[in-house]
Image: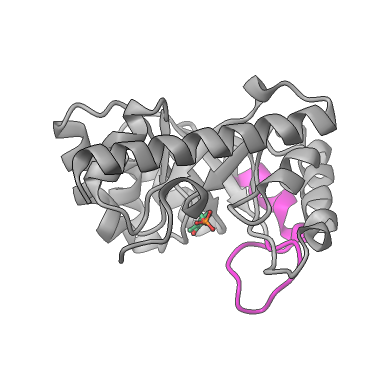
Amino acid sequence: MSAVALQQDVEAGVERVRERIAGACERAGRDPASITLVAVSKGQPTEAIAAAREAGIRHFGENRIQEAVPKIEDATAAGVEATWHLVGHLQSNKAKAAANAFDVIHSVDSARLLRRLEAAAPAPRDVLLQVNVAAEPQKEGVAPDEVEGLVEAAGRTANLRLRGLMTIAPIAGDPGEVRPVFRSLRLLAERFQLPALSMGMTDDFEVAIEEGATLVRVGRAIFGERRS
Ligand SMILES: *Cc1c(COP(=O)(O)O)cnc(C)c1O
């Protein structure tokens, strides 16, 4: 694809997603400015990231350290200024690389990982706890009743700022089926007075916004299908 065609494609994708966000906000009586669109650029080349930056995206999400670190370096060298979000699972032996490369880590799911990030973070980092609300056996994240312990553990760190909770909803035929999952995450966050709710992807971000999402993580609806 030529650079011009890529730019047009990504711009159209960003515009469509912004319209869908605006529609969901209207239904929910929310201000679109209260929602941060995180463009998930995994599987996309650095050129697509630069195109999205041109189209007004300021937040990017990646899910694997190995793929993300060189891309963030390339994008930064190419003049892309952005806030980088790690949205995928993080093993504690990669905490140092994650704390160096990312501004926000959405996938904290153990006290051990909190300790590793705290030790490695070169500057204060924003973190979210990933919660496996629907208790799916194959999915990462802590059980809802483990959140309290991790909120306390995060409170004992000096370098990590616990902002909120994150979840990945089950795959559903009808996005309405995931509404109770998003609602449960919101109620859990309210219990601990955590303001940030990272929930909603290409297939379900509108329902997530109706249920209170403050960060939506959208890949395919912006960039199209992933290339790798
Ligand atoms: C890939 C991914 C996304 C984006 O998924 P799309 O369906 O492409 O919008 C969001 N969150 C996480 C954790 C992901 O791994």
Taking the spot 36% from the left edge, 53% from the top edge, the residue there is 95
| Residue 122 counted in the magenta span | no
Residue 211 position, x and y percent, is 80, 42
Residue 9 position, x and y percent, is 38, 43
| Residue 146 counted in the magenta span | yes
Report the side of 70 relative to 186 (left or right).
left
Number of numbered discs present?
0
Q: Nearer the viewer, residue 66 or 153?
A: 66
Report the side of 55 relative to 20 (left or right).
left
Residue 37 position, x and y percent, is 54, 35
The image quarter in which residue 165 lies = top right
- Colour scheme: one colour
Q: State which region is magenta.
A: 132-153
Question: Can residue 157 be seen at all in this image of the molecule?
Answer: no
Q: Taking 223 as reference, is 138 above or below it?
A: below
Q: Nearer the viewer, residue 132 or 83?
A: 83
Taking the spot 67% from the left edge, 44% from the top edge, the residue there is 151
Q: Residue furthest bottom?
A: 137
Q: Taking 92 as reference, is 38 above or below it?
A: above
Report the side of 128 relative to 79 (left or right).
right
Taking the spot 72% from the left edge, 64% from the top edge, the residue there is 143
Taking the spot 30% from the left edge, 35% from the top edge, the residue there is 51
- The quarter of the picture where the C terminus appears is bottom left
The image quarter in which residue 4 lies = top left
Q: Nearer the viewer, residue 110 or 10?
A: 10
Question: Can residue 32 be seen at all in this image of the molecule?
Answer: yes
Residue 52 position, x and y percent, is 36, 35
